[in-house]
Image (cartoon, rainbow, N blue to C red):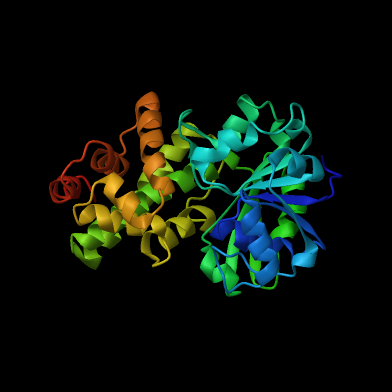
Amino acid sequence: MSNYRPGRVGIIGSGSWGTALAKIVLENKKRINWYFRFGETVRQFKRSRHNPTYLTNQLFDTDRIDFYTDIPSIVEASDILILVTPSPYIKGILSKAKEGTLQKKIILNATKGIVPDDYTVISDYLKDTLMIPENQIGVVSGPTHAEEVALGRLSYLTLACSDISTAEVLSRLFTTDYTFCNVSGDVRGIELGSVLKNIYAIASGVCQSLRMGDNFQAVLISNAVREMDFFLSHVSSVYRNINDSVYLGDLLVTGYSRYSRNRTFGTLIGKGYSAMQAQSEMEMTPEGYYGAKCIRVLSKKYRIDLPIANTVYELLYHKEDAKESFEKLSYKLK
C-alpha cells in the first residue's frame, strides 16, 4: 500500500476523545463523516455547533461534517474508519456493518482498551475475527488528553501500522500546528501498553487516596515502566524503546493528570469503594477495569509475574483491602 492516499475519514465514537480527534482531522480534511448513536444528539449538535455532551466549549463548522446514526451507512461512505468507542461496545458496533465492507477499509483503533469477552487487543480482533488485512489496521495513541487537545495545547501522537509507508501517509491526518504525529510498526505493543498504563493509573489513584506520598508514587511508576517493558517484550517481538512518548509518556500523563479517568477511578477504590460503586459514582466504566482482567488472563497464559497489575486486578475483582494490598506490593518494588 505504498502508494496509498487518504480518502474520506469516518469517526465512530462521539465521546471526548472522538470529539478531539474530529477537531484534529478537520484541520487536514475538508469534510469528515461522524457517527452518533442518537439522532437527537445530532440535532442538538447542529443547533449549537458543538458536541452537546463532551468538550462543549469546542465549536465546529457543522457544514463540514456529515453526521450518521447508523453504522452500515458511515462504513460505506468512508475510506478510513477511526474507532473511538468504548471497548465493550466494539464488537456490537462492528457487527452492524454489512458483510464484506469492513475488509475494504483502513481501520485505525484510537480506543485504549481491549475486547473484553475475547481478552484480546482490538487489532487482533480486527485481523483474526473480522479478517481485515493486517496492513489495513493501525492504532493511534500517545499521551494526549482530549481536554488539552481541545485547548490547542501541544500534544504528541503516534500512528502505528505494519506497513510503515502507510503509517507515514496516515500520520499527516493527525499533524497540525499543535499536534505532532510519529510513526511506528508496533501496533500490538502500543495497544497493550495502552491497556497497561490504564491499570497503572488506577494504582496511582489508589496510592493518592491512601496518602502513601510522592516518594512511593515515584517508585510505583518507575516499577510500572519496568513491568510494562517486561510484559511487552514477552508478548510482542517488535523492537520498541519503552521511553518513547507513546509508552512512557502515556503512562505518566495517565498516572498523574487530573483529567485521567482511570486515576480518578483508583482514588475511589482507595477510599473503600467497590469497583461497581466507583463506576456508579463516575457514571462510566474506565477502560482499566476491563484491562485488568485481560492482562491477568494474558499474564497467566505467558506465565509472567506482574505484581502491580495483579494487585489492581485483585482489588477490582476480588475486593481485596486496598491498604493491605499495597503494603504487600511495597515489598515487591525496587
Identify which residue, 302 or 65, lies in the foreground: 65
Q: Position of residue 249 (x, y in %)?
A: 48, 60
Q: Position of residue 58 (x, y in %)?
A: 61, 72
Kindly identify the residue that appears in the image at 66 percent across and 73 percent down. 59
Identify which residue, 107 or 281, lies in the foreground: 281
Location of the N terminus (image quadrant): top right
Kindly identify the residue that appears in the image at 57 percent across and 33 percent down. 91
Task: Name the image quarter holding residue 51.
Answer: bottom right
Query: Residue 108: in sight, yes or no?
Result: yes
Q: Position of residue 37 (x, y in %)?
A: 61, 48
Query: Residue 238: in sight, yes or no?
Result: no
Q: Position of residue 205 (x, y in %)?
A: 29, 58
Horizontal relation, residue 174 to residue 231: left or right: right
Horizontal relation, residue 30 to residue 292: left or right: right
Identify which residue, 321 or 88, lies in the foreground: 88
Report the label total.
Answer: 0
Work out which residue is located at the far right of the displayed protein and give it: 3
Horizontal relation, residue 178 to residue 209: left or right: right
Kindly identify the residue that appears in the image at 51 percent across and 63 percent down. 145
Residue 108 drawn above or below residue 217: above
